[in-house]
Image (cartoon, rainbow, N blue to C red):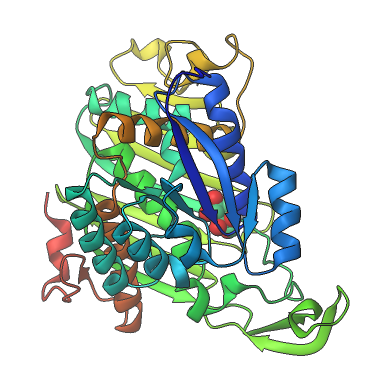
Amino acid sequence: MSPESSPLRIAMIGHGFMGAAHSQGWRTAPRFFPLPLQPVMQVLVGRSETATREAADRWGWAEAATDWREVIARDDIDVVDIVTPGDSHAEIAIAALAAGKHVLCEKPLANSVGEAEAMVDAAAEARRQGARSMVGFTYRRVPAATLARDLVAAGRIGQVRQVRASYLQDWLADAESPMTWRLERSRAGSGALGDIGAHAIDLAQFISGLPITAVSGVLQTIVEERPLMAESRGLSGTASAERGTVTVDDVALFTARFETGVLGSFEASRFATGRKNALRVEVSGSAGAISFDLEELNSLQFFDAAAPITEQGFTRIIVTEPEHPYIAAWWPAGHLLGYEHGFSHQVKDFVEAIAAGTDPSPSFADGLQVQRVLESIETSSATGSAWTDVADHQQTNNPQEATRP
Ligand code: SOE
């Protein structure tokens, strides 16, 4: 940490699971990367004064507050980090950008394409005043995922022929797991589709280097009602007898057509019994393949079709050499990273972009493109899984288009 560099004072809005992960990033990145500006964890904002103060003390924030509007109006705040449920992303981000703050917003960018479009417009206007914005698709910054993208971009697997991606969890497989905001459409926008399907979409596009242009999908809600959390009704910490209605999807299955006509298969489920956090992307090429699995995040499977046939097979690259993305800042080869390191990499790249006056990636426009894919999948599912163009959500007249070479 170079004391002479200017402070970058952060306000974080929200303090759930992502609040903990982002706090780890803000706290740790300056101690492992020589940042051009020094993040100062100034204010943590939440709805409950007591819970927010406790979280601020635990994670290292100087102040706790309950009024986000008041905080983003402060002259001593430079960055607003939004880690709230999706129903407040647009309002907070647009207000923070209008106040000239740099904004980091968790994924998915918003709960609708309309909201995401308004956020992109606000980001473009704020950019003219020098404010930068980024959407938090953190898994791009797992070194093995970045290496996968670099190998594909360098042509090491040849021409991309097929993509397959899935994000499988099982924390909702128990029908008696209580209601949470992630199961309410008004709060989360969608279920597995936007919560974890958004990660699969973004990472598949990032690694393949190809945007999705059309989709055909189906959504399913497996468990229609769940116990309400007693806390949600002011009682002690047990599930109450009352039940709430699940208004989002539990499973999303979809086929995607990428820009070059390449097809991809996708699955997002929080009912995949035994799968804990299995985000997997495999890209098959004319000269090889890569396969990434978040549950094995320190390694990447690489197949080189140019190797002698007697030596061919998927190689397990242990992505811990100093020559690998981000690794030089951490430990010697073979000493592994964890889930939390991606959040430090996200802070590093965001702070460096702010200092350099460049546009962070992924941008709000990238987040809007993912939102369009999500909404197209919902449109497709509602119309019998018809092929649906991402750009304008029109159903393609000829599904055979998907078979273009
Ligand atoms: C829950 O499915 C969740 O916390 C997602 O909301 C996160 O985006 C994902 O990274 C881990 O799982």
The correct choice, above or below, for 386 with respect to 119 in the image is below
Please determine whether, in this image, residue 251 is positioned above or below residue 246: above
Residue drawn at (38%, 37%), measured in percent from left and top?
A: 350
Q: Quadrant of ligand 1?
A: bottom right
Question: Which of the 4 image quarters holds residue 64?
Answer: bottom right
Quarter residue 93 falls in: bottom left
Q: Position of residue 403 (x, y in %)?
A: 16, 57
- Residue in the image at 33% along x and 58% along y: 99
Note whether residue 61 is visible. yes
- Looking at this view, is 113 or 149 the one in front? 113
Instruction: Judge whether residue 340 can be spotted in this image.
Output: no
At 46% across and 67% down in the image, what residue appears?
Answer: 69
Residue 404 point in image, percent of width and height:
11, 54
Total marks in image: 0
In the drawing, does residue 268 fall left or right of residue 350?
A: right
Q: Is residue 252 left or right of residue 161?
A: right
Residue closer to the observer: 293 or 79 = 79
Q: Is residue 35 left or right of residue 44?
A: left
How far across and how far down the image is residue 372, in percent? Answer: 27, 65
Residue lying at 51% horizontally and 50% vertically, measured from the top left: 11
Q: Residue furthest front?
A: 75
Judge from the rendering whether residue 136 lies leftward or rightward of residue 175; answer left or right.
Answer: left
Position of residue 62 measured from the top left corner of the image (x, y, whole percent): 64, 44
Whether 7 is drawn above or below 66: the answer is above
Rendered view: 212 above or below 373:
above
